[in-house]
Image: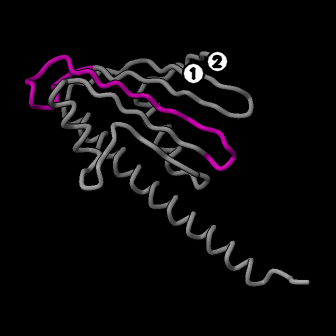
């Protein structure tokens, strides 16, 4: 695996994740921590962060061409009360990219945060974007299935 330094910070990496989630060639998206159907992702991540002042967020995206990207975020609180979002801390991260040219680990510089609202708003922003991407994937899969069914209707026999 090739290891590259992006020269960017982890908030730039988050923007790249948002861009990837907006693409129209998404095949599959997955994330950890796991969320049960009655939970909201942002609440799960925020509660982990409040309880432990540390949270690991993993996102894997598979594209139609078979390429994959795995985003890794580690949020570490440095100050603040347990039971509340840390008032300051560091976010670290990297991306693992796999395509026909091989695999790469792309490193990003850690970023400090000094406002708990900044972290909470980024988690909410990501969770909303992820949900919209899931909805788009579902719609695209339904359209693909409909196209297959429609093609069968007009398939020549004989």
Task: Tell me residue 12's x, y (percent).
Answer: 45, 31
Is 131 above or below relative to 88? below
Asked whether 80 falls inside the magenta stretch, the response is: yes
Task: Tell me residue 15's x, y (percent).
Answer: 45, 38
Q: Bin the neighbour count of mark 1 within 10 Å (Cα to Cα): few under 14, some 14-19, many 20 and up.
A: some
Viewer-proximal residue, 75 or 147? 147
Q: To which quarter of the image does residue 75 belong? A: top left
Eye-nearest disc, 1 or 2: 2
Mark number displayed over residue 1: 2
Task: Tell me residue 103's x, y (percent).
Answer: 65, 25
Secondary structure under the numbered disc 2 in the rendered image: loop
Asked whether 49 falls inside the magenta stretch, the response is: no
Give the labeled residue for mark 1: 105
Mark number displayed over residue 147: none
The boundaries of the magenta stretch are: 63-89
Q: CA distance from mark 1 to mark 2?
A: 7 Å
Q: On the rendered image, what quadrant is the N terminus found in? A: top right
Is 54 above or below relative to 66? above
Q: Earlier in the sequence, mark 1 or mark 2?
A: 2
- Residue located 62% across and 75% down the image: 146
- Residue located 58% across and 44% down the image: 62
Task: Tell me residue 38's x, y (percent).
Answer: 24, 55
Q: On the rendered image, what quadrant is the C terminus found in? A: bottom right
- Residue located 34% across and 47% down the image: 127
Q: To which quarter of the image does residue 142 belong? A: bottom right
Viewer-proximal residue, 20 or 38? 38
Q: Is residue 107 left or right of residue 1?
A: left
Secondary structure under the numbered disc 1 in the rendered image: strand
Q: Are marks 1 and 2 in contact (CB under 8 Å)?
A: yes
Q: Is residue 71 left or right of residue 63?
A: left
Q: Is residue 29 left or right of residue 64?
A: left
């Amino acid at each position: 695996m090739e290891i590259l330094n992006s020269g960017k910070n982890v908030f730039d990496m988050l923007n790249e994740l948002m861009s990837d989630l907006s693409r129209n060639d998404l095949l599959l998206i997955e994330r950890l921590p796991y969320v049960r159907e009655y939970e909201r992702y942002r609440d799960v991540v925020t509660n982990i962060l409040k309880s432990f002042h540390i949270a690991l967020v993993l996102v894997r995206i598979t594209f139609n061409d078979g390429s994959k990207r795995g985003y890794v975020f580690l949020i570490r609180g440095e100050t603040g009360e347990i039971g509340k979002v840390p008032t300051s801390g560091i976010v670290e991260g990297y991306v693992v990219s796999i395509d026909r040219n091989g695999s790469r680990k792309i490193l990003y510089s850690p970023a400090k945060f000094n406002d708990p609202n900044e972290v909470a708003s980024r988690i909410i922003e990501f969770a909303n974007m992820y949900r919209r991407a899931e909805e788009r994937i579902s719609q695209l899969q339904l359209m693909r299935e409909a196209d297959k069914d429609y093609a069968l209707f007009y398939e020549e026999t004989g």
